[in-house]
Image (cartoon, rainbow, N blue to C red):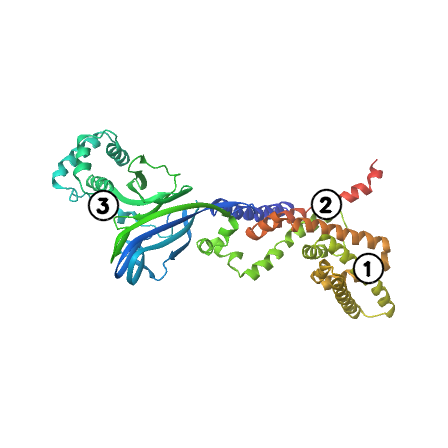
Amino acid sequence: MISKKYHTIIIASLVASIGLFLVYYKVAVLGMPFMPDETKPVYRIEAKITFEGKNKPVHVSMALPKEQEGIQIISEDASSSGYGFTKASTSNGLRAEWAKRRVIGPQTLYYTFELVLREGFEVKNIQDKKQLSQEKELLLDIPVGLQSAAKNLLKDVRWRSSDPHSFTAQLIRDFSDKDPSQAVKILLAKSNISKQDMLYHMLRYEGLTVRKLNGFFLDDTHRNFHLIPLLEVLHKNKWQRYDLETGKIEKNKKFFVWREGGSSILDVIGAKKSKITFSVNKREVPSRYLIDNKNIVKNSAILDFSLFTLPVSEQNAFRHMLLVPFGALMVVFLRVFIGIRTSGTFMPILIALAFMETTLVTGLIMFVLIVSIGLVIRSYLSTLNLLLVARISAVVIVVITIMSFMSILSFKLGIEEAMTITFFPMIILAWTIERMSILWEEEGAKEVLIQGGGSLFVAVCAYFVMSNPLIGHITFNFPEVLFVLLGVIILMGRYSGYRLTELLRFKSLAE
């Protein structure tokens, strides 16, 4: 049978571990910022389409990129003044389409993306590898006169390789060599297909599972560039990408795939001199910008069931509410370990919340004034021998009257800080005055000063903790940290030893 002591430790450790794991998952997997001033790189990608109209109807179709592992698109926008714009799902993937009845002269269209790199981001609908597998094909797309040279080259590369990946790397190296072989010279000189298509068909002839990619590396800044052609080969359920000039591409290099497969990147009907270029711009933005983005929130189950999905007004209410547990932690620590006596258990937390709205100095002055005036009036009410309910109600009315008078007076004197007195909890102030008045009658003025001063000291300590920007950031973005606080408070609740004030009190006895 587990004793209550160890049972409490197990429960507290379990609760705290759950909170720590959720915080770790958000930071390490979802990429949420733990520090409030943290920034993240955002890449803005712009596709620029130019052409000349011939006084005819124009239809423009551009391939759009798919979702990719580790890369998440957070926004996209089409700039096409005067054009009709739609997105079309075709057999070759999603495409952006512009149309206009009559077009004359030079025209420019833009399509922009904003994306972030997220290691934990996964694409929900990944294309099945079985659909990508391809059987060995004939070299039909290579001219008949060049097929013999292609076969001889493949035979030679086969002897200099051991698996599909080494075969692909060696074949690309042969085509990229500064002094290529005679077969490569013939294929490059007399073939009317691109280098990417040539390698693609030769690899398929060899029986490899291969696909064509066009995209670009996510570096800092590039302007007016064209897409880089790549090949991707599957071996043992692993895809390996190959640059057509340098060979293998390391996995840590982020490559944004704009087009996958053999479909055209741009089709323009009814115009001439069509061209598409791309630009990439990298900028650092506050991580808060990414947290507020709806596309990021809806793609994460945890974030989709979080405070970020609430209306802004409700979010602001929770910003203050989630700070209360930190104030409670300060109250428990100062009362259990230090031994500070307060008027009421959690009254200092509410006073600290009021200080956050009024500022500390202004709040302290107003609190002392209200309580002092309230005690004087409460002492007079005690001579009337009123019942408790009536007496408390009278004190509440007196508190409201004092607050109203102080607000009006501060407005007349031009003291704007004092007008925030309305943030003080009226009922709590009334109960504080009532408790202090009874304490004065039973224990004397000294005990009132001790508990009143202790309440203000605890409230000030809680104010400094609750108003800390880092604490506010953590509690709102990682409310799971409250589980950690709960575990700590449960462990603190088991403490029954001497308090610091008691050690000081019995110091002379110990000596």
Q: Residue 372 carries which label?
A: 1
Say what secondary structure mark 3 lies in: loop
| The one of 173 and 427 positioned closer to us in this rendering | 173
Residue at 21% of width from left, 40% of height from top? 198
Distance between mark 3 and mark 2 Cα atoms = 72 Å
Q: Which amino acid does label 2 sit on?
A: Phe
How busy is the neighbourhood of tag 2: few (under 14 within 10 Å), some, or many (20 plus)? some
Q: Residue 121 carries which label?
A: none
Pair 1/2: label in front = 1
- Residue 375 horizontal/vertical position (percent): 82, 61
Q: Which amino acid does label 1 sit on?
A: Ser
- Residue 485 horizontal/vertical position (percent): 62, 49
| The one of 271 and 426 positioned closer to us in this rendering | 271
How busy is the neighbourhood of tag 1: few (under 14 within 10 Å), some, or many (20 plus)? few
Q: Considering only order in the chain, which callout, 2 or 3, is on the residue closer to the N terminus?
A: 3
Q: Which amino acid does label 3 sit on?
A: Gln
Q: Which residue lies furthest to the front in this view?
A: 105
Q: Which mark is residue 337?
A: 2
Say what secondary structure mark 2 lies in: helix
| The one of 491 and 3 positioned closer to us in this rendering | 491
14 relative to 114 in the view: left or right: right
Say what secondary structure mark 1 lies in: helix
